[in-house]
Image (tube, rainbow, N blue to C red):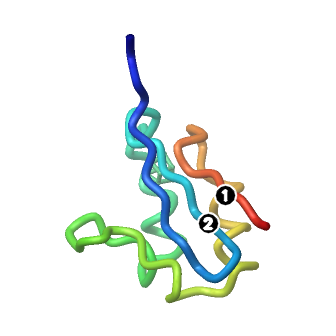
Amino acid sequence: MFMETIKEYQKDNFTVIWKPGRCIHAGVCVKTLPEVYNPKATPWIKCDKASVEALKQQIDACPSGALTYREF
Ligand code: SF4
């Protein structure tokens, strides 16, 4: 059975969810918020570097659906 890889990055009660198998490497995330998304760093997503509003706007612009988020 295929199990999709899902990575989660937490910022208070906001979670960025990344599904690497869906990423089409369009680079929208890196261009929009380079302080958050750095493919050469570990972890490559540092969600404490931007506001939740900025993260949401950027995630909504991800063309592939690889990036989503959850709030609770
Ligand atoms: S914006 Fe979405 S599809 Fe583009 S590189 Fe980032 S995660 Fe991948």
Task: Give the answer, above or below, for where 52 lies relative to 56.
Answer: below
Location of the N terminus by quadrant is top left
**How much space separates mark 1 and mark 2, taking CA atoms?**
5 Å
Say if mark 1 contacts mark 2, CB within 8 Å: yes
Place of residue 63 in the rendered image (x, y in percent of width and height, measured from the top left): 60, 43
Residue 43's place in the image compared with 20, above or below, is: below
| Left or right: residue 13 compared with residue 7 | right
Label 2 SS: strand
Confirm if mark 1 falls within 8 A of ligand 1: no
Q: Residue under label 2, please give it.
A: 15
Residue ID at (57%, 62%) = 16
Quarter of the image where one finds residue 38: bottom left
* Amino acid type at image mark 2: Thr
Q: Position of residue 19 (x, y in %)?
A: 46, 42
In the rendered image, which residue does mark 1 sit on? 69
Going by the numbered disc 1, the residue's amino acid type is Tyr
Q: Quadrant of the C terminus?
A: bottom right
Percent x, y of residue 15: 61, 66
Q: Which residue is drawn at 59% across and 79% down?
A: 11
Q: In this view, does 32 lie to the left or right of 5?
A: right
Looking at marks 1 and 2 on the same chain, the residue that comes earlier in the sequence is marked by 2
